[in-house]
Image (cartoon, rainbow, N blue to C red):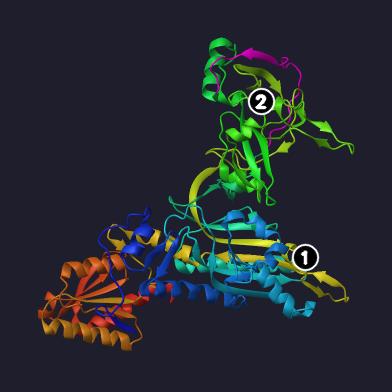
């Protein structure tokens, strides 16, 4: 296909958009691939759409390779299936909800598990119909509170979601591995670096869950790796709990005056000043830090919870959110604390909550009720001693011992994961990195099939609930990740197998001979099956054309200009920066050779 730039729907920008913070957002807008319509919502322009279709084609080829079949479901969906699985409420405010003129509830789909389940239920009834994997590439919608980074986190985005249906768990394992292998091939073909990490299922539910992350400093996900091969999203890291310690020799707890010590830093300073130890100074890890949070459950119930973590660590809100999902979490405000006068800000301790609270009692069935829940970090095990708030202004309790002086309602993974923490599988210290989530695969199991009544008759004629898997790739997010990793200070530099055009021909002069030669080369390349963008603009300077070509990022540029007088044209390779002249009569042959080399295994 040959396109002339004088008629192509493209306008580049010299300045970065005011709202753009990351490279991909800046360059995709400046180079004319996308345009902002509203916060988190973008219009795909011809260049961007061509690029998107190239990425989609690779995804489709690998899905088809494992026997998956493509369908296309609506984006506007009825609420009833989502109410049946509780996700109408569990998704919270990120779900776009609307009503039709008759008052019926609808949503813009954030994902399609329910609809795929019902689609199969409507068609299949026997184990002989299975296994089955179907997929779509569809626009999804989530009402992000803070859309950011262009295509990285938007309210509207393109996703490939596939769903497997099997009669038993063994079949699910096979389907899951097939998708996992396909994802690896997809990202390798795209030339996108990735790490597979253990992850949380979140609102999707299910058992096994893994993310494909592209390592990037702008990534929203923190993940960890160990020298021994452990890899996980920070949200999914399980803290190795130490062995309980004996109570022998631990002094009795003692309440002490700690004036002006509402923070851990001030508490450590006061403790070393007023109550110095003989063996070593007090430090933050000797203290038990209290966090009061509120959970808003899907049914709207608001619950105040006290968390206890070692004082040298902070709460990681993403880990906390993953631990309490589908409830929404936020730090407790003054109005929450006012309802619980037993919690004294700056001096809150475990004796005010959980099993230790005076408000806790047993109901007529012997179940503990009353008081707020108290959850501790897994490191807070029996026999560990702490300095903790005494629930009295200006006072803390020393040598407060877990299991002897206080207990908790349970443990929670909420504390931050730090560089050097030990991997839960014993494979060494953890190294923290940032990444962009580009894929996520789940073993859903029978959650959706059971809720929506998807059953088939097995070999014995008995009804069996089908087991499912869900497999997503953020196609538009992948495109943004590729822009991040294939760019420089001048603009984009696409790999040959996904570039919107194969060759960018530039006529850089004013004479008819130059434009005629450029058109001739463009037409020859077009006849040979190349997608060509011909910059035929007559009144645009060579400098502007060069800048536009580097910004747009087509892998091979052919410059027809001053060298034409000597029978030469210049060929530029965008990614490597190489530049060389070739005789005009051999230009097409040389371009074909270079294109084959750039395509490599991807052709």
Quarter of the image holding residue 460? bottom right
Quarter of the image holding residue 334? top right
Q: Tell me if residue 507 can be seen.
A: yes
Q: Which residue is mark 2?
A: 349
Q: Is residue 269 magenta?
A: no
Looking at the image, the residue that sits furthest to the front is 102
Q: Residues within 10 Å of mark 1 (few under 14, many from 20)?
A: some
Gap between marks 2 and 1 measured at Cα:
43 Å
Secondary structure beneath dot 2 equals: loop
Which residues are drawn in magenta? 241-262
- Residue plotted at (55% across, 42% down): 430
Q: In the image, is residue 200 above or below residue 469?
A: above
Residue 162 location (% of width, % of height)? 61, 70
Q: Which mark is residue 312?
A: none
Q: Tell me if residue 131 can be seen.
A: no
- Residue plotted at (51% across, 53% down): 145
Q: Which mark is residue 450?
A: 1
Residue 513 location (% of width, % of height)? 12, 84
Looking at the image, the residue that sits furthest to the bottom is 527
Q: Main secondary structure of the magenta part?
A: loop
Secondary structure beneath dot 1 equals: helix
- The one nearer the camera, 571 or 361, is 361
Left/right of residue 397 with respect to residue 13 in the rendered view: right
Mark 2 vs 1, N-terminal side? 2
Q: In the image, is residue 47 above or below residue 27?
A: below
């Amino acid at each position: 296909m040959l396109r002339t730039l004088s008629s192509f729907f493209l306008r580049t920008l010299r300045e970065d958009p005011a709202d753009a913070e990351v490279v991909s957002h800046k360059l995709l807008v400046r180079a004319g691939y996308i345009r902002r319509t509203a916060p988190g919502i973008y219009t795909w322009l011809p260049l961007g759409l061509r690029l998107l279709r190239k990425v989609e084609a690779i995804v489709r080829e690998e899905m088809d390779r494992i026997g998956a079949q493509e369908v296309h479901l609506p984006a506007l969906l009825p609420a009833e299936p989502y109410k049946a699985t509780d996700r109408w409420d569990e998704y919270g405010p990120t779900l776009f909800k609307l009503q039709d003129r008759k008052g019926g509830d609808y949503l813009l789909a954030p994902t399609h598990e329910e609809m795929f389940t019902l689609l199969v239920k409507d068609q299949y009834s026997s184990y002989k119909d299975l296994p089955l994997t179907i997929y779509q590439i569809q626009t999804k919608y989530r009402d992000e509170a803070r859309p950011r980074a262009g295509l990285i986190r938007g309210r509207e985005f393109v996703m490939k979601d596939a769903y497997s249906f099997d009669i038993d768990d063994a079949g699910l394992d096979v389907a899951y591995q097939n998708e996992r292998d396909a994802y690896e091939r997809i990202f390798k073909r795209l030339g996108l670096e990735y790490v597979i990490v253990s992850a949380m299922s979140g609102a999707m539910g299910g058992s096994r869950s893994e993310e494909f992350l592209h390592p990037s400093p702008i990534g929203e996900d923190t993940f960890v790796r160990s020298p021994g091969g452990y890899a996980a999203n920070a949200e999914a890291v399980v803290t190795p709990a130490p062995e309980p310690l004996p109570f022998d020799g631990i002094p009795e707890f003692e309440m002490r005056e700690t004036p002006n010590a509402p923070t851990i830093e001030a508490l450590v300073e006061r403790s070393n000043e007023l109550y110095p130890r003989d063996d070593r100074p007090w430090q933050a890890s000797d203290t038990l830090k209290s966090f009061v949070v509120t959970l808003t459950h899907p049914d709207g119930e608001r619950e105040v919870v006290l968390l206890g973590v070692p004082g040298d660590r902070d709460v990681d809100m993403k880990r906390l959110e993953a631990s309490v999902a589908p409830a929404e979490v936020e730090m407790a405000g003054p109005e929450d604390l006012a309802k619980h006068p037993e919690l004294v800000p700056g001096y809150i301790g475990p004796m005010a909550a959980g099993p230790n609270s005076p408000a806790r009692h047993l109901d007529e069935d012997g179940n503990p009720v009353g008081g707020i829940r108290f959850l501790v970090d897994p490191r807070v095990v029996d026999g560990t001693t702490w300095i903790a708030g005494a629930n009295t202004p200006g006072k803390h309790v020393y040598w407060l011992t877990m299991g002897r002086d206080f207990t908790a309602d349970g443990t929670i993974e909420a504390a931050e994961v730090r560089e050097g923490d030990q991997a839960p599988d014993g494979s060494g210290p953890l190294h923290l990195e940032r990444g962009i989530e580009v894929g996520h695969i789940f073993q859903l199991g029978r959650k959706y099939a059971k809720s929506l009544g998807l059953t088939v008759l097995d070999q014995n004629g008995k009804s069996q609930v089908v087991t499912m898997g869900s497999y997503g790739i953020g196609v538009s997010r992948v495109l943004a990740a590729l822009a991040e990793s294939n760019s420089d200070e001048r603009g984009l530099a696409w790999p040959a197998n996904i570039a919107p055009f194969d060759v960018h021909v530039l006529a850089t002069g004013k004479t008819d001979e130059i434009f005629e030669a450029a058109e001739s080369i463009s037409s020859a390349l077009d006849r040979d099956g190349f997608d060509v963008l011909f910059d035929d603009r007559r009144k645009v300077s060579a400098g502007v054309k060069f800048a536009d070509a580097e910004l747009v990022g087509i892998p091979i540029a052919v410059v027809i200009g001053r060298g034409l007088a000597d029978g030469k044209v210049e060929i530029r390779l965008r990614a490597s920066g190489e530049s060389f002249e070739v005789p005009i009569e051999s230009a097409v042959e040389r371009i074909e050779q270079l294109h084959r080399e750039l395509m490599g295994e991807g052709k």
